[in-house]
Image: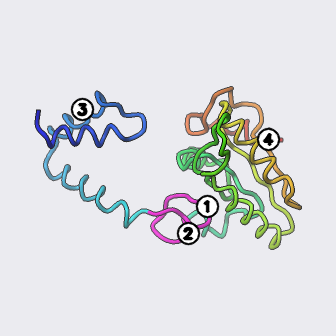
Amino acid sequence: MNRHYDRLIELFARLPGIGPRHAGRIVLSLLGRDPTDIQAFAQALGDLPTQVTLCKACFNVTDRDQCAICTDASRSVDALFVVERISDLQAVERAGLWKGRYHVLGGTIDPVGTDQGAVLRVRELAVRARELVARHGSVELVLATGTDTAGEATAQFLAKELASLKDVRLTRLGRGLSSGTHLEYADEMTLKHALESRK
């Protein structure tokens, strides 16, 4: 086989959810595209590290210090929707059900791991919660992690870690999300019921 072709397959296969066979199909698909499209794709990938960054407040994607949601004055500031991933935030935004702000944890904890919460942005969440309490008197943190084992373990971990914060109300999404569901795959009505019945 061609070395460059094999290298592309290897690189695509490193992406989550893409194995070597799927990566091979992607590369073959690209071979049939207009060279201008491929060059535009390559340029966009090359620009990714310098043109896309994470919001310093909520860790959403942005091209400046803070994302459009965090700088939107019409958004409620007394509640944060705490999600596992950016894709969860995007799913809730598409549904148009949340008018507050967000906090992206950056994943979940391993329920059987020894270093629980090491990679999550829990410290940053606690700092934001304290700042919001200082400015507004109280804050609600809606723990919107998935209903799978890792999501439930993460919610329990957050509840324990944030329990000592004063004037911070922790709520969890209610009925509507079936066991094992991730927010990014939930439909609008399911999200609506889960948000309305949070407790």
Residue 87's x, y, as percent?
A: 53, 46
Q: At numbered mark 4, what does the secondary structure look like: helix, strand or loop?
A: loop
Q: Tell me what residue is drawn at x 65 percent, y 45 percent.
A: 115
Q: Which residue is mark 2?
A: 66
Q: Which residue is mark 1?
A: 58
Q: Residues within 10 Å of mark 2 (few under 14, many from 20)?
A: some
Q: Which residue is mark 3?
A: 24
Q: Which of the two labelled residues, at mark 4 and mark 2, occupies the earlier sequence position?
A: 2
Q: Tell me what residue is drawn at x 80 percent, y 54 percent.
A: 162
Q: Which of the two labelled residues, at mark 3 and mark 4, occupies the earlier sequence position?
A: 3
Give the foreground label among 3 and 4: 3
**Which label sits on residue 198?**
4
* Disc 1 + disc 2, Cβ < 8 Å: yes
Q: Which of the two labelled residues, at mark 4 and mark 1, occupies the earlier sequence position?
A: 1
Residue 64's x, y, as percent?
A: 48, 71
Q: How far apart are the two marked residues, 1 and 2, measured between alpha carbons?
A: 8 Å
The answer to whether 47 appears left or right of 167 in the picture is left
Q: Which residues are magenta?
A: 53-67
The answer to whether 140 appears left or right of 184 in the picture is right
Give the foreground label among 3 and 2: 3
Q: How far apart are the two marked residues, 3 and 4, measured between alpha carbons?
A: 44 Å
The amino acid type of the residue labelled 3 equals Gly
Q: Tell me what residue is drawn at x 81 percent, y 60 percent.
A: 139
